[in-house]
Amino acid sequence: MPRLPILLLLAAAALVPGFALAAPAGGEKTAKAMKNMNESSLLAPAWTGPFTSKEFEKTNDARIARAKVQIAKMVAAKGKRTIENTLVPYDEASRELDMAGSITSLMENVHPDSNVRTAAEALTQKVAAYGTEISLDRKVYDALVALDLSGVDAETRFYVERELRDFRLAGVDKDEATRGKIKTLRDELVKVGQEFDRNIRDDVRTIKVKPEQLSGLPADFVSSHKPGDDGMITLDINYPDYVPTMTYCTNDEVRKHLYLEFQNRAYPKNMTVLKQLIEKRHTLANLLGYSNWADYITANKMVGTSQNVRDFIDRIVAASGSAQERDFQILLRRKKTDDPTATTIPFWQTSFYNEAVKRSDYNFDSQSIRPYLSYPNVIQGVLDVSSRLFGVTFKRVENVKAWDASVEAYEMWKGDDLVGRFYLDMHPRPNKYNHAAQFDIRTGLAGRQLPEAALVCNLPGGEAGDPGLCEIDDVNTVFHEFGHLLHTLFAGHRKWVGTAGIRTEHDFVEAPSQMLEEWMKDPKVLQTFAKHHETGEPVPTDLVVRMKRAEEYGKGLQVRRQMVYADLSLSIYDRDPAKVDIDALMKTLVTRYQPFQYLDDTHFACSFGHLDGYSAVYYTYMWSLVIAKDMFSAFNHSDLLDPTVSTRYRDAVLAAGGSKPAAKMVEDFLGRPYNFEAYRAWLNEMP
């Protein structure tokens, strides 16, 4: 959805759903005291447990109730509309709903207790419903319109003007009957979106294979997968099983079988659910005066219009044509050494042959670097790198009770000042969100409360004696998601909740996280934490250089795959739903943009969670990457740990939060508007 007024943002499919720190155990009195302290103390952690579903519901119902009190106070104010009697209570209501919506979103995705997950889903619906109610309330809107903004600072003016724009996008200026229909549709969309996400989360498929069929997989992978009583080994579609199997397993049938299961997650359930999402969003867009959902949702993005998205996709497709053709011919040439008659490559073979090209053309075997990338080393690495870049330190908080025993808690300090908190929930378990994301729990507010967030991933390790040897893509994921987390924490010290945190345009939010990925590709940086899990020796420079070259191979193919996703996201939402055949559209886009043959018995869209949360704006990733490459060009590439530029970047971009337009933040950092040239140079550069 568009970046609606902050109170309605929680009703929208959030980009980076929420999170918080737990209270210590100690019985009902302790829990009650902790909860009360959380609502008033700057340094107190947000309350994430331990709690029953009833306690969780009571706490967050109270937050919604307090938000209602603030809105009533705002509307009832007499006399001249001022910042104090209007914007202050509005922002306080936003703070309460932000805390409620963030923690409920997190818990419905990660909590091991099904009762808490169910309660969290219901609470998310309540928060969203009240957010929708406010966004359609003419009295609230009129109060903000009447504010005297003469003499206010630029951040406050920007906040109010953006909220007024987004109230209008929400439909506040429609007649009463239309506003009623809008509210009904928004409430329904929250529930449909939850069902879509739940179906993906719950459908963890497995296959069974014989021990000898694991040929080619790393020794630690094989040793951690013992045969069952039937003599067979079970593999599931979560990343710690899926990625190594698709990359290293020499058995083509095993790869194909697992690929089919992975591509059919949540099918057929989500085919029906997705059609409901598309239809309801189209109806809502029409009520709001737009011809389709894509036109509506792009109205407050950097891109501006859905036609501009279409033009951007076309530009990326044109720019990546020669790179893709070069990459594909290299891949096909490698396959022909196994099958001289080959003219194409099925999707389930692409990761395997991509790895084969790395070995044959770049003298790099991905398994050779895994011993240096144990999970503890990777986590410590991202902490140490971030500390050196941004002038902060991280402290592990022991004996904190979170929603699961595997979760770790940390604090972020700047000198003697505590400036943020976060959790790491990093390994797979049943009924847990099975992708990777940063979840907010509480937006920070200068002088009022500290920002808190969590990383939720599905990485190797987590079991006693398992070093959790990561793939290089796992390391990339950690740096990417930590980029979101740093953005949240640094932006959590603004004067308004509505300008704090990642409140910037949706199509900019991936840029800071994508740019942080650059650091884990640098030999000097990688050697600060990539140490052999047995000997402690740092990863050899030559190995990292070969890795970087090998990892750069295939970017043309990768960019084109991203355009399949971006066009799918746009095309199911930029037309009459009656004309959308999801599977046929996916087949058309694969044929148009990629040199691979579409596999008819796959239903990727059913597990493409971004079709809910991002809806029509998956182009965001490539749009943000263009900006990220340009921002990265300003850094000292011979010494990426030099804090000179990163400190300026921290202050100009990360800490700015939502206090000004994203393009202005980038211009403040670069000293000029961003452009396409750094991205073009990267795309065309030979590895």
Image (tube, rainbow, N blue to C red):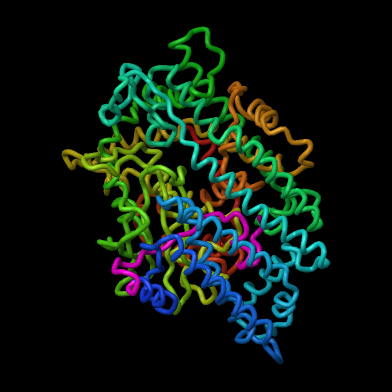
Q: Is residue 38 above or below residue 538?
A: below
Out of 341 and 395, give the one closest to the viewer: 395
Frontmost residue, 657 versus 215: 215
Query: Which stretch is magenta?
Result: 1-30
Residue at 29% across, 69% down: 26
- Report the quarter where the N terminus lies: bottom right
- Residue at 55% of width from left, 76% of height from top? 66
In the rendered image, the residue lying farthest to the top is: 341
Quarter of the view holding residue 245: top left
In the image, residue 341 above or below residue 392: above
Residue 579, percent from left and from top: 78, 36
- Residue 23, magenta (yes or no): yes
Residue 498 in percent (x, y) is at 57, 70
Q: In the image, is residue 584 above or below residue 572?
A: above
Query: In the figure, residue 399 lies in which quadrant?
Result: bottom left
Is residue 366 one of those drawn in magenta? no
Residue beneath the point at 49% across and 26% down: 259
Q: Residue 251, image x and y in percent? A: 40, 17
Residue 654 visible in rendering: yes
Where is residue 133 shown, x and y percent of the image? Answer: 68, 67
